[in-house]
């Protein structure tokens, strides 16, 4: 059993160090003077129980907005290239017909030389084709016609049409010889360094030695057969 608390009543207040009963509460005397009447009048307060706070809700992170998608630059539509119209090939000039040969033999070339000799003494006539007047190409084509070979009419056409060209050192009877820069003159080779030709106006068909003059002016030879 605990001793009952001692009660002190003082007119001037609670004694220092004594125990005072106020209501149902037992108070220790103050260590300094306390007004008992003021202490009795003080309201008795009970500690207020703290209401438990609900746990803090974690803040929901605000999702960041998606990064803007870069739009690739639009390329301009390619313009198809326009090709220039194809150029039509230029028409080529008609080629001279090749000389028609029948493979003239030794007898054929002999006929060529024989025909040319028969015309010695005939007059020269520009564009003449015989039988009594000739120019140089007219005599040459007529002589080869006797061997069955058809040749063009002019000197340059004859040289271009006949494919077999002959060097001066390889001449044979019946070969056609051309002279001057434009191959403007032709004669029939008769062998032994001579030729038969219709030289020019005022002259006659003749057989001449090639000599230094014609050899110097020589500008090719062909063998039609």
Image: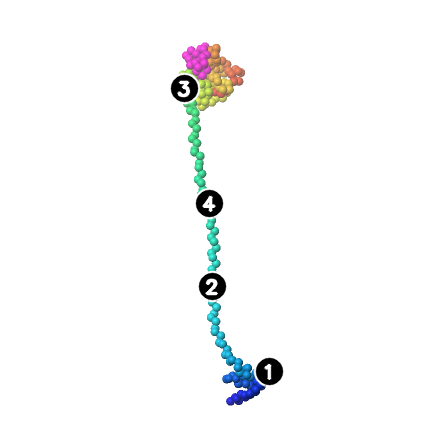
Within the image, what quadrant is residue 7 found in? bottom right
* 3D distance between C-alphas at marks 3 and 1: 167 Å
* 3D distance between C-alphas at marks 1 and 4: 97 Å
Q: Nearer the viewer, residue 220 or 203?
A: 203
Q: Is mark 3 on a helix, strand or loop?
A: loop
Position of the C terminus, as image quadrant, is top left
Does the magenta portion include 65? no
Residue extent of the magenta highlight: 120-140
Q: Is mark 1 on a helix, strand or loop?
A: loop
Q: Earlier in the sequence, mark 4 or mark 2?
A: 2
On the image, the x and y values in percent for residue 120 come to 45, 11
* 3D distance between C-alphas at marks 4 and 2: 44 Å
The circle drawn on residue 60 is 2
Q: Earlier in the sequence, mark 4 or mark 3?
A: 4
Q: Is mark 4 on a helix, strand or loop?
A: loop
The circle drawn on residue 32 is 1
* 3D distance between C-alphas at marks 1 and 2: 57 Å
Query: Can you identify the residue that label 3 sits on?
Result: 150
Which residue is drawn at the image coordinates 53% and 82% (left, top)?
41
Which residue is drawn at the image coordinates 45% and 16% (left, top)?
137
Query: Can you identify the residue that label 4 sits on?
Result: 75
Q: Which of marks 3 and 2 is nearer the N terminus?
A: 2
Q: What element carries label 2?
A: loop
Q: In this view, does 51 lie above or below 69?
A: below
* 3D distance between C-alphas at marks 4 and 3: 72 Å
Q: How is the image coloured?
A: rainbow
Q: Are marks 3 and 2 in contact (CB under 8 Å)?
A: no
């Amino acid at each position: 059993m605990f001793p009952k608390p001692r009660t002190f009543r003082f007119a001037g207040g609670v004694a220092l160090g004594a125990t005072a009963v106020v209501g149902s509460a037992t108070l220790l005397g103050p260590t300094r003077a306390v007004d008992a009447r003021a202490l009795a009048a003080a309201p008795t307060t009970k500690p207020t129980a703290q209401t438990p706070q609900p746990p803090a809700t974690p803040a929901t992170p605000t999702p960041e907005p998606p990064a803007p998608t870069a739009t690739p630059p639009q390329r301009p539509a390619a313009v198809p290239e326009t090709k220039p119209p194809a150029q039509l090939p230029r028409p080529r000039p008609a080629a001279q017909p090749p000389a028609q040969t029948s493979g003239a033999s030794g007898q054929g070339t002999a006929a060529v030389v024989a025909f040319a000799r028969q015309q010695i003494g005939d007059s020269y006539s520009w564009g003449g084709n015989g039988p009594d007047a000739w120019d140089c190409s007219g005599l040459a084509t007529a002589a080869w016609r006797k061997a069955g070979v058809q040749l063009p009419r002019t000197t340059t056409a004859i040289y271009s049409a006949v494919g077999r060209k002959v060097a001066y050192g390889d001449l044979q009877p019946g070969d056609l010889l051309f002279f001057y820069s434009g191959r403007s003159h032709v004669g029939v080779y008769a062998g032994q360094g001579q030729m038969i030709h219709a030289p020019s106006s005022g002259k006659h068909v003749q057989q001449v030695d090639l000599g230094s003059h014609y050899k110097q002016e020589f500008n090719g030879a062909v063998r039609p057969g």
